[in-house]
Image (spheres, helix red, strand yellow):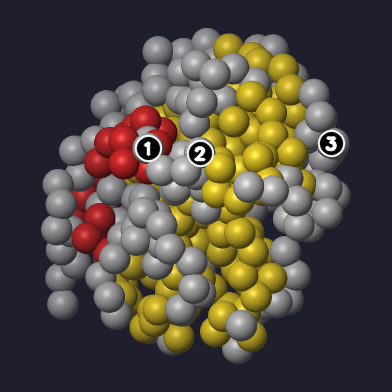
Amino acid sequence: MPVRFQMPAHRLLSGLLLAALAGCGANANLDAVRDAGNKSVMRYDQFQGATTNQKVIVAVAGGGTITVSENGAKSWTRKIVDNTASLIGVTSCPDGSFVALDFYRKIWVGDAGAKTWSGKDIKTQANPLAVTCDAGNRIWVVGSLTAILSSSDKGASWNEQALGQDAMLTTVQFLSENQGIVTGEFGAVYTTRDGGRDWEAGNKIPNDAYPLAALFKDANTGWLAGAGGVILATRDGGKSWTRQNNRIGVPVYGFVEHAGGLYGVGANAVMLKQNGEDWTPVDHGRRGPYIRSALSLSQKELLLAGGAGLLEVVKLADGQAK
């Protein structure tokens, strides 16, 4: 059965991100504080990502908002690095530091305690869309203009590689210091085996897919989410892709491995669990416009980060919320 994306690929992810970062007017007019006893998480926060260095947890949102937990997401502290910043993602590096990605061509580098943050400009004409660290603590950023950028000095200087296309690269992941995978608009897949010195174009994902999220467990096995709720899987390093069954057809914005299983989170605060070739909904009891990312905290606890101030832990047992 052919894979059909129900929405044109043209600049879809940027629209989703900018809408989320701008925030919904209705949400902004709700109670400013989601819990009267906790003013660190606000109802109007539009969380875009969460990560941990195993000591502290960091989540980021629009308006330069960084929230930090030192006790396993039981409580949070709030910091605004710059109220004009649009933080669209965050990653942790092997040395314990954090990197938050600012849509306005900037990164914010945090120390291992996430207490001090410094802004570094990204010298590029491209719009950054995704960030990660490799095993050697190099920072990688991908975005529009098919740009792949890297920094080995925490953003003080950048090396940019433009791959000769006018496409938006939307995901980046390093499996080791040498092996990395990038996906993007028009079904693009690029891989490196030499630490990013060279990037090789692979077979295109079917029907010019526009990846909203991607996760590779290893060089051969990976999953990709596209518009219209499409979920694809590869077992041969992207040479071929097969469509898996999304039972409710909701777009997925992030994948997470948790307690031996694979989950997807996305629009309408939906969570899906992979069961063979099927993705079935999990009733986790939280509501909101979307979940942007999920973070596995333990065998039973999963942190959800998303719109309308959603930054909460759910407890899962056998794939169901408890």
Q: Crowdedness of circle 3 by 10 Å Cα count: few (<14), some, many (20+)?
A: some
Q: Crowdedness of circle 1 by 10 Å Cα count: few (<14), some, many (20+)?
A: few
Residue at left 58%, top 12%?
Answer: 121
Q: Is residue 125 above or below residue 7?
A: above
Residue at left 56%, top 64%?
Answer: 256
Q: Crowdedness of circle 2 by 10 Å Cα count: few (<14), some, many (20+)?
A: some
- Asked where in the image residue 320 lies, by quadrant, the reply is bottom right
Disc 1 marks a residue whose amino acid type is Asn
Q: Tell me residue 245's x, y (percent).
A: 30, 79
Q: Which sits in the foreground, 97 or 181?
A: 97
Is residue 250 visible in the rendered image? The answer is yes
Disc 3 marks a residue whose amino acid type is Ala
Q: CA distance from mark 2 to mark 3?
A: 30 Å
Q: Which sits in the foreground, 86 or 277?
A: 86
Q: Is residue 157 above or below residue 48?
A: above
Q: Which mark is residue 29?
A: 1
CB within 8 Å, label 1 to label 2? no
Of callouts 1 and 3, the N-terminal one: 1
Which element is circle 1 on?
A: loop
Q: Which mark is residue 136?
A: none
Residue denoted by label 3:
112
Q: Tell me residue 257's x, y (percent).
A: 60, 68
Residue at left 29%, top 28%?
Answer: 165
Residue denoted by label 2:
32
Name the quadrant of the N terminus. Answer: bottom left
Disc 2 marks a residue whose amino acid type is Ala
Q: Tell me residue 216's x, y (percent).
A: 53, 60
Q: Is residue 10 left or right of residue 319?
A: left
